[in-house]
Amino acid sequence: MLFRSSWSVTAWTQIVSYPGLLSAIEITLELAVITCAATLVLLLPTMIWIRLRMRWFSRVFEFLCLLPLTIPAIVLVVGLGPIYNRIERYNLSALQLFWVYVILALPYAYRALATGLDAIDVGTLAEAARSLGAGWLTVMVRVIMPNMRQAILNALLLSSALVLGEFTIAEILNYVTMPVALFNISR
């Protein structure tokens, strides 16, 4: 028998009524938005600039962006713990975690954006737009970025998925985000 009459939504109401869960979900969603925005603002113009002006620096930049994959999260927490302890004196919220999340999201966002840049001929598009009188900001925002919509969306999805699932850093630094609250509920 697939459905029993004793099934109800009481378990779901108990989870939602857990103290602090809704604020943890709110903080996590805010962290996801801030992390995605900061990652795109840092990476996308830099990658386009390197692709157009400093091609020789692309391997070094790729290495720097992929470096957080080789460093375990626990090592990042041990290294950043004293910094966050000093910042904690100013009573800032868990939203300050977005700096660490940007570092963790760099490899994933970089690969997604690099694939998008490889799919289009950035040099030709930039030269054509510049020859028609467009400035560099217009070239980036109105010519190159619309051609990279799928890559930008992939970078946003990967960055937000990382924030929504990151448990280790928030738990060790004593911030209550959604994964930490869900872990506490399961205990």
Image (tube, rainbow, N blue to C red):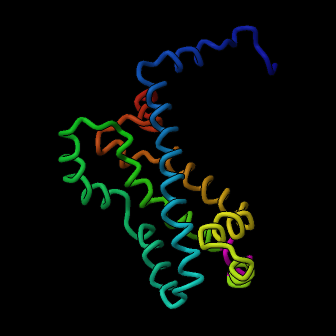
Q: Is residue 52 above or below residue 5?
A: below
The quarter of the displayed image where residue 144 is located? bottom right
Q: Residue at x 22, y 46 (%)?
A: 87
Instruction: Determine the image quadrant of residue 184.
Output: top left
Q: Nearer the viewer, residue 12 or 105?
A: 105
Q: Position of residue 62 (x, y in %)?
A: 50, 78
**105 on left or right of 116:** left
Q: Residue furthest right?
A: 1
Looking at this rendering, what residue extends furthest in the front direction?
133
Q: At 33% from the left edge and 36% from the top edge, which residue is drawn?
A: 93
- Above or below for 93 versus 46: above
Residue 119: % across, % down? 74, 76
Foreground residue, 99 or 168? 99
At x 32% / y 57%, what residue is drawn? Answer: 74
Determine whether 95 is above or below 52 in the image: above
Q: Most extreme residue toward the bottom, as rendered?
A: 56
Residue 116: x, y in percent? 69, 71
Mainly helix, strand or loop, the magenta region? Answer: helix
Residue 147 percent coordinates (x, y): 74, 67
- Observer-nearest residue: 42 or 72? 42
Instruction: Give the residues in magenta.
Output: 115-122
Q: Residue at x 59, y 19 (%)?
A: 12
- On screen, residue 162 versus residue 75, left or right, reads right
* Figure check: 165 above or below 128: above
Check if residue 119 falls in the magenta segment.
yes
